[in-house]
Amino acid sequence: MTDGVTIYGKEEAEAKAKARIQNIHERLKRNCQNISVEVPKNQHKYIIGPRGQTIQEILQKAGVSVEMPSSDVQSVTITLRGEQTKLGPVYALTLIYSKTNSVKTGHMDVPSWLNIGGKRFN
């Protein structure tokens, strides 16, 4: 997939802008990598966040993009894309794991006489 960039301006300024953009693009191509992380499907919502806010937070804090599998696919693989130094444990991976581990669900067996839903404690 490619996206185009349109540059408007005087010929000399346009040439300088184009050269600068090409240099940035080449640097990013050399330094960017992908990391795939497997996260249980029921925890994906904690990485996405309300209206995608958590993904945006990860992009802003770590400078990497987060690609989530479609909700109708059973894949548990999340892909992080960005500069190698920003993908490691100090940045993006730490943010991903902190979001997935931020909410836990547990189950506890209780005697039937202890009706928690009805607030009855004998």
Image: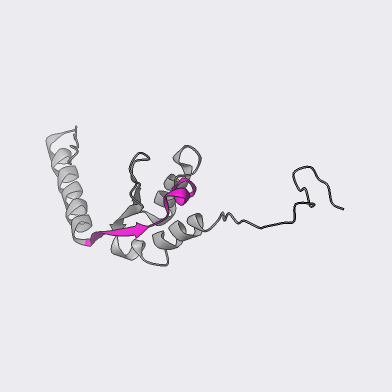
Q: Which residues are magenta?
A: 31-46
Which one is nearer the viewer's eye here, 18 or 96?
96
Q: Residue 7: which quarter of the image?
A: top left
The residue sitting at 49% across, 44% down in the picture is 49
Q: In this picture, is 48 found above or below 104?
A: above
Q: Is residue 117 left or right of residue 89?
A: right
Colour mapping used in the image = one colour
Residue 111: image location, x then y, percent: 75, 56
Name the residue: 55% across, 56% down: 102
Depth check: give the residue in front, 116 or 12: 116
Query: As rendered, which of 81 and 116 lies closer to the eye?
Result: 116
Q: Residue at x 62, y 56 (%)?
A: 107
Q: Is residue 39 shown in magenta?
A: yes
As drawn, which residue projects farthest toward the front?
A: 112
Relative to residue 40, is residue 50 depicted above or below? Answer: above
Q: Residue 41's spot in the image, x, y percent? A: 42, 50
- Looking at this rendering, what residue extends furthest in the bottom direction? 89
Residue 115 is situated, as x and y percent measured from the top left of the image, at: 77, 48
Q: Report how many numbered discs are placed on residues in the image.
A: 0
Compared to 1, does 65 lie above or below? below
Is residue 35 shown in magenta? yes
* Quarter in which the N terminus is drawn: top left
Tell me the residue at 40%/61% (across/down). 93
- Of 11 and 51, nearer the camera is 51
